[in-house]
Image (cartoon, grey):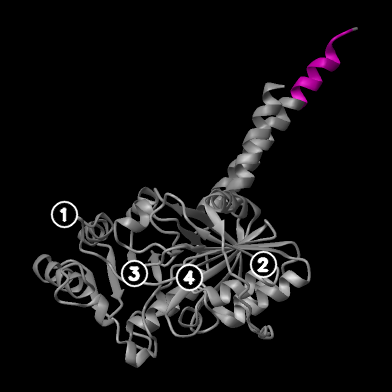
Amino acid sequence: MKVFLCSIFVFVYLIGAVQAATVTTFSSPENSYSVISNYLSGLTKSAYLSVYTFTNLGFAGQLVEASKRGVDIKVIVEDSPVGEEVERGVLCFLQNNGVEVYLYKGRLKFLHAKYIVGDNRSVVVSSENFVDDGFYKNRGWGAVIEDEYTAGELLQAYITDLKDSGKIKCDGETRKIEAKPTEKIKLYKYEDQEVDLIVAPDAVEKILDLLESANKSIYIEQFYIYRKWGSSPNIFLEKVIEGARNGVDVKILLDSNYYNTEKSDHNSNYYTVEYIKNISTVEKIPIEAKLVDLKSLGFSKIHTKGVIIDNKSVLVSSINWNENSPRNNREVGITITGDSVAYFLDKFLHDWGQGSYSELSSSKLVGKDYGQTIANIFLFIIVVSIVMILIKRRFYRRSKVSI
């Protein structure tokens, strides 16, 4: 019996090690609205949304259409977004048309995540809010993850935040909104991708581990990166610099809007870029940083919070690189390892080259590392063989015993 239980345990462990998720990649402004629209149209049971702000009329119309066909839809929105009031028009349209809408009032600093849990079997994780710019003007990254385990994990966070939220009060407000038809588009879909969910607060260690895992390269495209967290250095940024000191090729692309580059703010992207340039010049290490040319790219801002490690893993998330975001907010990210990273690498290379592909050719993409998977399969075969031999010997011995 011990041998049998041991073999079952090893079997489950190894199967978990080689199984992976199906991932559909997307980005703003190219196809984020269309991918999420297609995703929603395929749901049959439930769609649970958590988003910092929600003002997009077309997407609201699609949620109502989904609700009418029997999909249970709930939406949680941050109650006090920075410098803004909650836009009630769209939210009350949802509420008055069968969609339950809640305002987050919990202990966390902000509900800043942007995700959907669909049919309790898949999730959408994005850097973008459900606003017009988030779909059509910003540079943003996102992914659809088809994996029941990941959906279950994220559903737990959703339930926690729902308990800390109150239903919106609309005072009979009405609004007519037409649902936009779902577009048929090409989906960038990848099988057998390894995924790891990152949920803040308490996301610091996972991100540090990801950065520390780099052996060849770290490419970062970020809304902003503070040089300091309070009076201390930004530990994410310092971990990246440490990687460059160990020979890792580091490239950092930051938003260039005026509010992110003010010289009066010593934590602005302007000073972060100058800081990196100085370190690169003095220490002669492979690290570069620059502000994006938004005009040549046609973006309103770089809003993604993306990291690519060794051209093999990518972090898609809502997590900004200040101290508050990973430690005190509700944030959600997903680390994906596999050939889907090529999609995000192409986007980074395009933006780094300011609208054209730079000297960093996508041919540098490191192929998917099958070494660990092959090793796990080989180990599984060995373990099963040993178990079968032991079982065979036990039956053989029993056949020799007289009754």
Residue placed most toward the observer, 181 or 75:
75
Please name the amino acid that badge 2 sits on.
Val
The residues tagged by marks 3 and 1 sit, at their Cα atoms, a distance apart of 24 Å
Identify residue for label 2.
99
The residue furthest front is: 171
220 in magenta: no
Identify residue for label 4.
53
Residue placed most toward the observer, 37 or 286:
37
Predominant SS along the magenta part: helix
Task: Kindly identify the residue that appears in the image at 36 percent across and 78 percent down.
Answer: 302
Identify residue for label 3.
220
Asked if labels 2 and 1 touch by Cβ distance under 8 angstroms, the answer is no
Percent position (x, y) of residue 110?
Answer: 41, 59
Give residue 231's mark: 1
Q: Is residue 210 visible?
A: no
Range of residues picked out in magenta: 392-402
Please name the amino acid that badge 3 sits on.
Ile
Nearer-N-terminus badge (1/2)? 2
Percent position (x, y) of residue 315?
Answer: 44, 63
Nearer-N-terminus badge (4/2)? 4
The residues tagged by marks 4 and 2 sit, at their Cα atoms, a distance apart of 16 Å
Percent position (x, y) of residue 200?
Answer: 43, 53
Task: Kindly identify the residue that appears in the image at 39 percent across and 75 percent down.
Answer: 303
Please name the amino acid that badge 4 sits on.
Thr
Give residue 15's mark: none
The residue furthest top is: 403
Percent position (x, y) of residue 307?
Answer: 38, 66
Q: Secondary structure at mark 1?
A: loop
